[in-house]
Amino acid sequence: MSKNKNNKPVWSTRIKNNRSGLFIKAGSSINVDKRLFKQDIKASAVHVEMLFKKKVISLQIKNKIIWGLKKIFNEIKKKKFIFDNKTEDIHMAIEKRLFELIGEDAGFIHTARSRNDQVLVDFKLWMLEASDDIVKEIDTSIKVIIKIAEKNIFTVMPSFTHLKNAQPISFAHYILAYVEMFIRDKKRFINNKDNLLENPLGVAAVAGTSFDIDRQYTTKKLNFKKPTGNSIDTVSDRDFVLDFLYSISVCSNHISRFAEEFILWNSDAFDLIKLKDKVVTGSSIMPQKKNPDTLEFLRGKTGSIYGNLFSMLTILKGLPLSYFKDLQDDKELSFRSFDQIKICLQIMREVLNNFVVNKKKMFQLAETGYTTATDLADYIVREYKYPFRKAYLITSKIVNIAEQKGKQLNQLTEKEIKGIDKKLNEDVLKLFNIENSVKSKNSYGGTSFENIKKMIKKYKKHG
Ligand code: ARG
């Protein structure tokens, strides 16, 4: 009978039974990688189909194994499967149960494969699904942002550079900047699929196998694009994990920058937006407080998401080729980042659906800080054919006068501006109108109301 009956690992024939109980528990990954049971069973089923097709195993054994795998799948689904943390990992747990169910014939399942390629095929299959999941979450978030933009095309606010008022923009234009970021995020996950779609199954431990296997068959049946090309690289490669963790980090970075801006704008000092009660938290001592904890949560989680990427980079640094136990952590890091980015995208949407724009304050702030000065400089270049640098100098003198007199630019008199350059007249004062300034920025990608309308249409079609 199989060794598994005695509850020993399959590889225990040469290792005496005085192993560290502490390490058996600590080194077990079952509580993490049990998440891969579906992929593990699917890949095993395809593997034995292939072994049968290539006449490595008989029809009877193949059928027995498939029957056992299906039974195990149902047991796990119905929560009747016992995940014992004395079992090393999900692969061993399933194989052990297969022995219990069908006896020694279970041992044929591991012909021409190793856990080194097995874990990779499971993990890549999981990551393909996870990437689609994230793309869906991003898509839903993009739709929410577009709705906000549609309602705020004519909401004018200042843009900031160095956090100083820069030029008037539409709030829709600002929020649509995040659509661009999320579209790039989506692309990253989609591009990652190129590498994910290379099938590792069949490279076995490190050298390949002497069995006459058909890797094209398993590739097709598991919906991969092609088999990986080098057995050593295959078992060593965790680039796809880095790509995944990096893509999540960048997406999280976008969420964090959004969170930071909204925290600032929701502050009493800025007062540009107001979070609704659904997404704020109170203080345990100050009864008046409504704190933006949701946004702080998003910003904070970015730290641990980056941490997962850095952990993986560090694990790989200096690791010789092929498999080492060090690599086992790749799954925990990926699962954690995946769970966190999903919840972050969902919470971000909760915030986006629960805030009010303070249009009045936005407009007032756009009028503060001489935000239309550049419009005058541009006008002088266009109308008087001055070089931009000369126009810039004239404009800065006008800003100086306004500052000295405590006036806004449109409150200056003709006499005051003529003092700087004789050509200037009252027409110029129209330039200082905030909405005209926004309207005038109609270069492709600019903030003009017309551009925004076009961009919203485009995002709705191709977003
Ligand atoms: N649980 C292991 C991991 O996730 C599976 C691969 C084990 N391979 C080995 N040679 N010990 O890395």
Image (cartoon, helix red, strand yellow):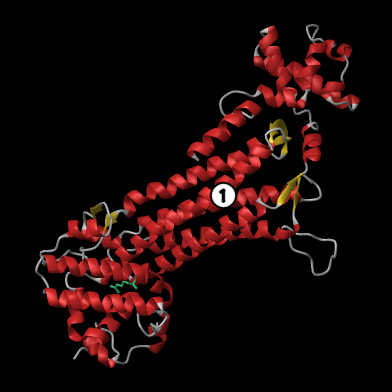
- 343 relative to 27 in the view: left or right: right
Q: Quick one: quadrant of the N terminus?
A: bottom left
* Front position in the image: 391 or 344: 344
Q: Residue at 72% x, 59% y: name it.
A: 278
- 318 relative to 425 in the view: left or right: left
Label 1 near ligand 1 (CB < 8 Å): no
Q: Tag 1, which secondary structure? A: helix
* Front position in the image: 298 or 18: 298
Neighbourhood count class around disc 1 (C-alpha, 10 Å): few under 14, some 14–19, many 20 upward: many
Q: Is residue 448 visible?
A: no
The residue at which mark 1 appears reads as 141
> Where does ligand 1 appear, by image quarter?
bottom left
Q: Position of residue 35 (x, y in %)?
A: 41, 71
Q: Residue at 68% x, 47% y: name it.
A: 261
Give amino acid for label 1.
Answer: Ser
Residue 147 position by quadrant: top right
Q: Residue at 49% x, 47% y: name it.
A: 185
Numbered circles on residues, count: 1
Q: Residue furthest right?
A: 405
